[in-house]
Each structure stands twice: as structure tokens, then as C-alpha cells.
Image (cartoon, helix red, strand yellow):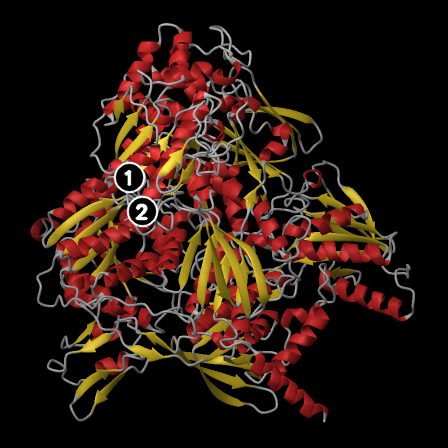
Amino acid sequence: MDFEPRIVAFLCSWCSYTGADLAGTSRLQYPSSVRVIRMMCSGAVDPVYVLKPLLEGADGVLIGGCHPGDCHYQSGNYKARRRVAAVKAILEEVGLDPDRVWLRWISASEGRLFAETVREMVDALKAKGPSPLKGEWAT
Amino acid sequence: MGIWMGANLSDGGDSNLPAGFPTGAVLVVGGGVAGMQAALDLANGGFRVYLIDRAPAIGGTAARLDKIFPTNDCAMCMLSPRLAECSRHRDVEIITGAELIDLAGEPGCFTARVRQRARYVDLDRCTACGDCVPACPVRRPDAFNGELSERRAIYKLYPQGTPNAFAVERTDTLPCHSACPAGVRGSALAALSRERRLDDARRLLEQDNPFPGVCVHVCDRPCEAACPRGAIDRPVALADLVGFVAEQATSPTTPLRAGVRVAVVGAGPAGLTAAADLARLGSAVTVLEAAPAAGGALRPLYAERGAASDRLDREIAAISRLGVEIRVDCPVQAPEALLGQGYAAVVVATGPGASDGAGSGNEPRTVGRGICWVEPAPTVAAAIGAGHRAAETIRRFLAEERGALGSGDAERSFLRFRFAPSDRAEGGEGARLVPATPALAPTPATSASTLGTPPVPSAESRPDGGPRPDPALLGSAEASRCLSCGGCAECGACLEVCQPGAVDLAMADRELTLEVGAVVLAMGIEPFDARLKGEYGFGRYPNVLTSLQFERMLSASGPSGGKLFRPSNGAAPRRIAFLQCVGSRDVACGRGYCSEICCMFVAEEAVIAREHDPAVQPTVFYLDLRATGKGFERHVVAAERDHRVRYVRSMVSTVREVPGSRDLRVRYVSEDGRPAEEEFDLVVLAVGLGTPDSAQELCHRIGVEVDPYGFTRPSAGSPVTTSRPGVFAAGCAAGPKDIPAAMVEGSAAAAEAARLLGAARGTLTRRKEYPPERDVADEPPRIGVFVCRCGINIGGVVDVPAVAAFARQLPDVAHAEENLYTCSQDTLRRIREQIEELGLNRVVVAACTPRTHEPLYRETAREAGLNPFLAEMVNIREQDSWVHRSEPVAATLKAQELVAMAVARARLLQPIARQRFDVVAEALVVGGGLAGMTAALALANQGFAVCLVEREAALGGHLRRLRYELDGCDPPAMLASLAACVLGHQKIRTFTRATIQQLGGRVGRFSALVRLGGESPGDLVVTHGALIVAVGARAVQPSGYLYGEDPRVVTQTELEVELAAIEHGAVAEGRAGAPDGGPERVVMIQCVGSRTPERPYCGKVCCRQAVKNALKLKALRPDAEVYVLHRDVRTTGVLEEHFRRAREAGVHFLRYEPGRPPEVRRKGAGLEVVAAVDGRAEALPLAADRVVLSVGVAAGDHADLAARLKLPLTEDGFFLEAHPKLRPIDFAADGVFLCGLAHSPQTIPDVIAQATGAAARAATLLSQGAVESSGIVAVVDDRRCTGCGLCVAVCAYEARRLDEERRVAVVEEVLCQGCGACAVACPSGATRQLTLERRQVLAMLEV
């Protein structure tokens, strides 16, 4: 079955969001099923923000932050890394696929990487198929 | 004694200074990117700025661009926030249509005389509604669109034009109008007829000439003699046109309300004309005629024309219908007596034979109180003119007597245009009034009354012998021949439709006197006139365009809305040729310099053209590909490799049109020397940059020297100074350059002006007042959604109306609309109005990226009395329309969902009160090379304290290795003087052998841990308000080419040291210029370590260094054989002259292919370089006794430092600025600035300009005293806080601590950076990150 996976992306304002903008100014094309929420820092992504969309039927959640060492807030991306690891453990625990959550480092100059990341994630999620929770709770 | 005297003199001098010296205001001439940048930096730095521009709107050439290289960003998107900031800035006064006439005084206190041309539209009244545009019948070629389209005489320069108001294009004289003794507005008749507005034309003609029926037959057509069209082919047949219009049905006239009673004695042409004018002005006119019939001298003339007397009666009847009472058989003996009979004024127009004693002369005279005697006129037309003048004389008299003649409205609407030009020309005396025509030349004596029968044109021929135009075509084809040479034809149609009454054709030019302390010249560029290169056919072949025309064609707001077309037939072009260097690098046409930007914009235009239409096949004909700036090399490489732009290295000899198809045959010599020919659908000429004549004249007027090309061309040591102290130059006024360089110079000029005027900072500024903030806490959300089309940028992909309609039905949305450009001034005003009128309390703008535009909409909300944090943006351009171009349906759906998410969040937005934080008035400059020292001095000389930190033991950086320069600059002397100034400056603390270990704090109060090495090691904490990064770069370490193996293989810098030593020795021994055994056969190899896969960028300085050293070699030893093996000679700008000089001196420049680099080998005792050059297959062996490698510039090893400073690097390892065009020397992080080689490879003048510019940027912050918090901070709800301390542990800024007494966590707002980590860490939900609260994010996820 071919479907367009729904992805929610949390991007840090300084690196990944700027990179996503650069993908735009470079007119790099990528799948349209990603919805970006601009955060000040990847370290501000609450685990709830990741779990809620997954439980409600989103096919994947992408978190984009500055490369290690580049965090505008010194160490927010490390915090994000720890939290994502915790979220994945929870997902595993409750029987959901932890690989539906991606954490990627995308800098302000990596518009191409952002576009590629979305493409890759869409392909990977297509291979997995729709979220098992999609039919149950999502509209 | 001497000391004392000096002190006394100095004291005396000070006390003689005028009060308020220096003046804390600056005049900026030119509102392009450089001028705007200078204006904003100065205004933000505490100075009052007058920004003047010749055009009716600021923006300069950048406003005409579609996209900007190398990022292919939308030019308007880059520009509009600047335009808006300039127009909203309380300390920037924009004066359009203005020119600097004279500049008197001294640096620090100049008096500038500025002449502002009348705009004819009142800026305060114009709402830019555009109703006037369809009313205007005049069509003019639209110069803004490269004359690819037409506009009206009343126009807005471009949609986002600032100030946001229309203007009337109008010259001082309309030739036909001025020539007509009766004052008939010929061009207006032509314009109205062409638009098939014959009713309007007829009404206009009636006003100007009540007797057209006979007048055209007895007139000798001075209008046609004056028509400039006659110089091209033949004049417009205006008199025939008058006859044609006169034949049209008369529109019904309603008599105006009778006002003051006026008597006219004599019902001849003059009397009846005066009567008609006065009636139109609203007075009750009575004409008294002694004869039994009205008409006077007209009656026999009509009779001569045969059977036309009923025509005369009809024309007289039309005058009666205006409310004029005509009494015949009514002789008047004593006109003066009429004044006693209830008439307020009397016109006496009794024609020849009447004796009045008024003396001779052509002009009407007012004798006594209220009597105007009309002189007999030689022709009917002159008599009608005299009648108009008499009416005007009476109007003036009565206006003085009692304020108005009749109905005030009637008078205004009639007079505002009818008499406007004469109002402008005359000196105040009623007697000199001429109706709508400047000084009348005496009419040639060919009239009926003096010479009997007038020359009656025959039916077939015109007076000039030409054929009569076909009467059927008069109203259309013939009228269309009018060039509308004077612009506005004074028909007055715009006056009638302008609801706010903004159009005012009586507006006069004015002169302003401005007291300023300094002047910044930024007059910008004028593209080369491609007609001067006749061999390319521009101006003759419609399908040959200039690059600026093509840019307009690509633009969404251009003549075709972004669609490519061939002007000859409108078809889509496929094969497009771009010709480089048209009017650049061409001594024959007076352009000996390289225009610097053409290689780049051609690559951009070719790529964008393919983006518009993938079928386009662009071919670029070029000489050298010059991509020297940051990111440029990647841009041109991508154009060729990824976008299939074909590059042909050749000079095109001719372009010829193919008859029939109108295709263009391009003839050139291919690189292997064979003549070639190719056909194209469209040819685009990359026209070079020059200075406008007006700019050169201005420089001449105010005593600023210019070079032969008209550039102010400053010295290398101070790139923004001019020959006149206190006057600075920025942008292309100083030489050709790209947008970021122009902006950097704008900042640098601001720094230089501020250095001069530092003492007056803040003395003339004004404060911005915002309306009191509306308390919306208890109101239910009322959200306004504004969806931007961004021309076709969004609207071309996303169904914007559908998004607006979707938004309208979302909860709490009170209003949703679409805008063409939401960021334009009129839309911003509209948003403010909607907030006020509809009581909106949240604003959502769906447009481009919030990174650039969110501040604009927050400010807009604030101006409408809302807390700025109640405005929210949705990115539907960078992250939607631009990245899903082929999926309009999905992109629209995405836009709708993103808007829904933003609305969901906007419902929960709360006002945020911002705190103010102090700013430490000291800067930290990292790096003590040319950039760092220059920046430090620029700041210190403005009065700010500076801490300069250099890693090495000595100041100077790369400058220490340079020995001489091309443009008279002496690097060792420059280094010595800079270092001495820095080390001796009271305001500068210099630390060498020092490094930055750690950086903390915030904008306005950073804190750096500096580790001192050397003799007294230790750590030092430097607290500072701003940080300038000037850490430089390094030279590429070459490998191969026998470098390091053979001492005769050296780098350019090593050769420079050697040559300087030889020269020094020769000078010392008194034999300068004599051969002395230095290298005789030299081969230079360019691009060693540049433009390679591992370093895909240009070293920029290496071509310059090669030319410099080659010239030095030739100077030292004229018989030296010098070969330069290059890939492209990149001597940009005026450096091109040195390249030419080198060729003239016999230096050989040979090109090699990157795939076949030259080989260096030992041959016998010498060296040999083998290279395949200039497209030849066989390799050329060159004997050499010195091989010189032009090594590029590599980024320094700054990864560690960048990490410590928390600053980003580019892929190439240079520091990454906030935006390559918009903010070229700012970092994204507030309060941190960038300059010098740490930014990118660049030349000495560029580095100085950047460093000075960075100082100006820092000064705007340091001069503030305080900054406001971003508002995005964490707050704690004490009731929920359990005092667990997790937030304290996660905070990286020590902005968190536990209040031990209350057992709650608190936030130091000054230190809080708003990252949000604590909010996630808080287990009790007591911490919220403002603007990104959990419930807000969760609401977005609900959508």
C-alpha cells in the first residue's frame, strides 16, 4: 500500500530550522507531508511532544538540532539526545517502533541535508507502513 | 611658553566653535542598499539622518532585481524589511525626488542645500489606492521595467515603493501646449483620443478653445512646429486632431451656481473666452456687445469658411449654456461705470479700433479696481489666449478682494491644473499671468485681422507639405503617435478621481536647507547604455535585451508577471544567449574596469530562467569567469554542472537578426580560433555598472574628486573616504561592487561619520512613541490571519485564496485575507487598521520565514496597540511553496494545516512584558590583524572602550607578510601606523599571546575568559557589550610543483619579499630600475589550492598578487619574461586596469584547463613548466628560473574557537554570517559581528571596509545604553514549584537558582537565553518558556 507518511518535525531555530529555510531558498524539493514546529532549541523538545503525535497516529517524529558542540545554548542538543533515547525506550516498552523517532543534526548551511533527511525518513516510514495507531485514534 | 600658547590657542578655538558643534545629523545621498544601510546604522547609533533620493521611492537598483546571487534569494524579500525599517525609523527622514545642490561649511557642520522636485502628490494624503492610474490617459515607457511595459504618467515606482505613494511624471514644459497661443493642451487631446475618451477630450478642448471650429482653419499650427516627434519623422497632426475632437458631440453642460457678478464688454473671441472661463469658475457673467450679433471678428472668418456661421452660433450657444448671459446691441460707453451697477469686476475686450488708453503691450491690464482691458490680438488664437489671461487676472483680483470668485470647489478643480504651470513660472504679479502657457512668443503676423486672408491649408496637404492624415485614423493611430514627451498632459483626470484630494498639480519644487555634520554619498549605479555597442543590436532588434530587462522579465512583479517572452512575438524563448562584459573591460567605450558582478548575476539569471521554464537552454559567452566572493564559485559551478548552463569562452563579435524569424545570429570566435555562428531566440547583454551623470555632476558641484569613470575611488587605506573631508562614499559611488559589499561600505561610512560626530550622538534624535498597550487579557481571542501571495513566490504554488478561506472558519478567527505582499507598507498599515477596526487581539501572518520577518509583524502589532508577542508567523514559502513546487494541492493542504496550527497556538498567546538590560560600552575584538586593528580603532575613535586580543606575539596578522600594493598603499607603513595607533590609544587594551577560552553572557553583557600567555601568564575576564570576530585565515600550504624540493619554486608572497628586497637594495645603491640579476624567466601558476574539490572557492587575492608581482618584476627588470598560467584572470573592479597594464608591459597570460594543470620539472640547470594552454592540444614548454605558485587562502583552524564562541562555520571553515546579503557582517547571535579573512578571502580595501563596518554595527549596540530582553524567557509559577532544583542543574547559563527561604526556583531574566531546557526538566509543570509554552505546543499538535 502506498501512503504518504505524516511526519511532525521539531527543529531548533538556530541550525535546523535555518537549514530548512536554506532548502527553500535553494529550491530543493522534498515530500510535503512534514509539518515543522520551530523550537528555540532541540533541548526544549519535551518527550510529550514526541509521544503525543505518535499516539495519535503520526507516522514519525523528526527532531533536528545543531551538530554536537554547535548548540547555540551550549548543551541543549545533548539534552535532546538523552531525552530521545529515553523516549525510544518508552516506545519500545509499550510495543511501538522506536525507529519512528529520528534525531538528526542539521546545521544552518545544510539545506541539502535537511531535504535528504526528509526524503530518507519518508522512504523509511513507507517501508514500515502506516503507524499501527493510525486507524485507532487518529481521524 | 610654547605649550602654554598652544593650550591658549586651543581653548580659544574651542570657545569659537558654534554652539551645538558638531551637528548630530547626517545627510545620506542615495537610497539604495548602501545608503539605507548607512542611514540605519547612523540612526540606530544616535544620529538624525536625512536620506535623499532622486527617484520617487528608495530602494535603488536592488529593487529592480528578481533574485540575488549566490543564494538566489528573492531580492524584494531582502529589501522590503530594510525599506520598512527606513520608513518607520523615527530618525530617518526620507526625502524623495531630491538632489543635493550645494554643500557649504566644514566637516562637523555642513549646510546642505537640497532641491526637491514637486511630486504633485501629497504624501500625507495619498493612500496609494491607485484609483488615479486608470484615470490617467498618458502612457509612458516604464523605465523601472526596462521599458518592456508601459505605465501611466501618475505612477508608483514599484509595488513596495517607499514612501508608499504615487507620483506624477511631469516636465516643465509641454511643447505643443506652450506653443499654442490659445493654450490648447494638444498632448492631452492626443492621449484622451487614443484611449477613446472622446467625451473627455471634447470637454477639455471646450475649456481651452471655445472656437475650435474656425480656429484650426486659420491657425498656422505652432503646436506642430514645436512637436518633438517632428525630429523623428513628422509631427503629430495636432491641429487636425483638434478639428476631429471638435466634431465630436458636445457633452451636456450644467450651468454652475452663479456667484459674483462679472461683466464682459465685447463678444469677440477674447471676451467670450474670458466669459466662459469666468463662468466655469462659478461667477455670473454678463457679456455686453455693441453689435447686433455676438462673435466679433470671428463672424467674417466663419463666413469665409463658407456655411460655417451656424457652427459659430453653436459654439456661442455652448458658452451661453455655461450660464453666460450675452446681450447684443448693448454698447457700453464707460466700462468703469459698470462697477457701480452691481458688477464686481469688468473685462473690456472690444477688439481693434476701441481706444482704451491702456497703453501698448500684449498683456491684459487691470486698471483701477476691477477693470481688465484686453489688448487687441493679432490672431484668433492669440485673442482666445488673451481672454484666458483676462479671466485669470480677474480671478486673482477677486481672490484678493473677497477670497473666492464663485463656488470654491469649482474654482479649485478648474484652476489646480488649468493655471498650474503659469503659477509655477510667474513671480506673483497678476499682470504677467499666462494661462497654462509659459511666456508667449509674439505670434507671426499671418493672422486674419492684419493680413487679410489666412493661409488656408488645402484639403490634401498640410502646411508642412506632408500628407493629411486619414481622418478616420485621427482619433486612434495619429493620436497614438504622440510621444507624451512631457509626461503628464495636464488633463486633470486624476484630480477628479482622487478621493483624498492628494493630487496637486500646482505643487512647486522646493529647496531645503539641512544642517548636517557629515555626508554619505551612495548614488549607486547606472547600467551601461547598450546602444553604444551597436554591433549587438540593442535598441534595433527587439529580442536583444539587457540583463536588467531580463531581470525584470524574471520578476513576479515585472512586465509579464515572471513569464519569459520574446518581445518580438511574445513567444517563450528556448535558446537564450548571455553576453558578458558589455560595457565592461572595454577601453574603447570608456569602461576600462570590470563591473565585478556580471558573471554572477548572469549565472543567477540563467539558473532562474531554467527554473521558470525547464525548456530554456542558456548559453553564456564570457572572457573570464570571475566568481571571487563568498559562495560564488559554488554558484557558478552549480550553474554549469547542475543547471545545465552552457559556458562558451569567447568574445562575441556581432549579433544579427535573422529576417523573418527575428531570431538572432551570434557570431564569435571559438577558443580554438575558428569562427563560429549560432542562432538564439533571445540575447541578453550583461551590461556593466557605471556612475550616473547626475552623480558625477553632484560630485563636481560639492568638490568631491572622481576618477575618469566617475567613481569617487578612495584610497586603499580608507575605502569610504573622499577627497573632501566629512564627505564619505559607499556602494557603487566608490566603484562597482555587489550588494553585501555595498552594505558593508554603508556601515563603514556610518562608522566614519560617527567617528567625526561622536560628540553629538543623541543630540538630534527623536523618540518613538507607541500607543498604550491594549489590555487584552480578559478578551476572548479575536484572531486576524493574513496570507501572503509574495507575488508568485507563494501564490504561484499555494492556492492562497483557499488558505484564507480555510483560515476564516477556524475557531476564534475574526478575519482572514490574502495580500499580494504582506510586508509592503500598505499591507502593514492595513493590518494595523484591521487590528483597530475589528478589535483583533492576535495576528497570524502566513508568509515567509519568521527568522527575517517576525520582528516586522511584531512591531506592526505594537504600533496598533497590541503586545508584540501576540503576533505569530507561519512559514509557507521557504518551507512550503518553494520546496513543493510541483505539488500545488499538497502545498495548499500543508499551508492550511500550518495556518491551523498557528491559529491553535495564537489562541493561547499571552502578552509578555520585556525587561531592559544594560549594555556595557566596551567591545571585545578577537584577532589583531588588519581587520581587528581597524575595527578596534574605528570603535575607540568613536569613544568606545575596546579590548583587543591577539593570539600571536605581534599585531599585524597577514599584513606583516605584505611588502607593496598596487594602488599606492604601503602595507609595512600601514601596519606600523595602525599598530602604533592601537597600542597608543587610551581606549584600547591590547593583549597579545592571548586566546579566548570561554565566552558567556548575553548581548550587551558578554563575559570572556581570556588566557594570557607570554611573560605574565594568567587568566582575565573581559566584560563587554559586543564582540567582533576578526581572526583571519591562513595561506594554503602548497604541495607538488617541486615546492619545498627546489628553492626556485616559491609562493607569490615569497616572491614579493624577494622583489621588495631587490628593490630596496637597488634603491639603496642608487640604481633603481636597473636589471640586477633577479629572476629573468618567471612562470606563475594560479589557483594552486583554490577552486579545487577540497577548497571549492576562489582565493580572490591571488590574481591580484600575480599581477602586482608581474608588474613589479617588469619594473625592476623590463627584459624579464613573465608568464602567468591561469584558469581565469579574476582582476575584478578597477583592478582590471592593472591587468591591462601588465599585458601592455609584456606579461603573458595563458589559460590552462583545471583537468590538465601545468607540470613543473627540472631541465638541465633550470626549471621547465609544461602546460597545455588556451585550448591547444599540445603542451607548451616554458623555461623558467623562478616558478611562482599563487596559493589560495584557506580558512584558519577555527573549529575550536567557533565552538567556544558558539558561532557557526561554513562548509569551507570560514565563519558563517547571519545572512550573506541581508546581514553580511552580523552573526545570527545578537551582539556578535564578523570581519576580515575570517569571513572569506578578500583584499585589503575589502577588509578595511568590513572591519569599519563591523565597528559601526557594534556601535549601534554600544551606543544604546540598554537593550530589551527578547521576551522568550522562562518563568516560574511559585505555587507549583516544589523547589526540587532540577531546573538549576540543567541551566547552562546559571540563570537559575533556588530561593532558599521560599524553597522555590527563580529565573534571572538577564541571564536567561530562552532555550527552554528548564521547562522540559521541570517535573511539576511550574516552569513555562514564554512563547513556547507546553500547552501552546500541544495545541499545535492537536491540529
Residue B709 at x, y percent in the picture: 66, 48
Q: Is residue B806 left or right of residue B915?
A: left
- On the question of residue B1158 being in view, the answer is no
Q: Is residue B859 above or below residue A129?
A: below
- On the question of residue B179 being in view, the answer is yes
Amino acid on which disc 1 is placed: Ala
Q: Residue at x 63, y 44 (%)?
A: B1155
Report the disc number at residue B855. Answer: none
Q: Is residue B791 above or below residue B35?
A: above
Observer-nearest of B1156 and B1309: B1309
Quadrant of the snapshot with the N terminus of chain B: bottom right
Chain for numbered disc 2: B
Q: Is residue B278 left or right of residue B685?
A: left
Residue B624 at x, y percent in the picture: 64, 43
C-alpha distance separating marks 2 and 1: 10 Å
Observer-nearest of B867 and B710: B710
What secondary structure is marked by label 1?
A: loop
Few, some or many C-alpha atoms within 10 Å of disc 1 (few <14, some 14-19, many ≥20)? many
Amino acid on which disc 2 is placed: Glu
Q: Residue at x 30, y 67 (%)?
A: A41
What secondary structure is marked by label 2?
A: helix
Which residue corresponds to mark 1? B344
Q: Are marks 2 and 1 on the same chain?
A: yes
Chain for numbered disc 1: B
Q: Is residue B44 above or below residue B1108?
A: below
Which of marks 1 and 2 precedes in the sequence? Answer: 1
Q: Is residue B895 left or right of residue B1252?
A: left
Q: Nearer the viewer, mark 2 or mark 1?
A: 1
Residue B361 at x, y percent in the picture: 51, 33
Q: Residue at x 59, y 72 (%)?
A: B934
Whether pointer 2 and pointer 1 mark residues with C-beta atoms closer than 8 Å, the reply is yes
Report the disc number at residue B401. Answer: 2
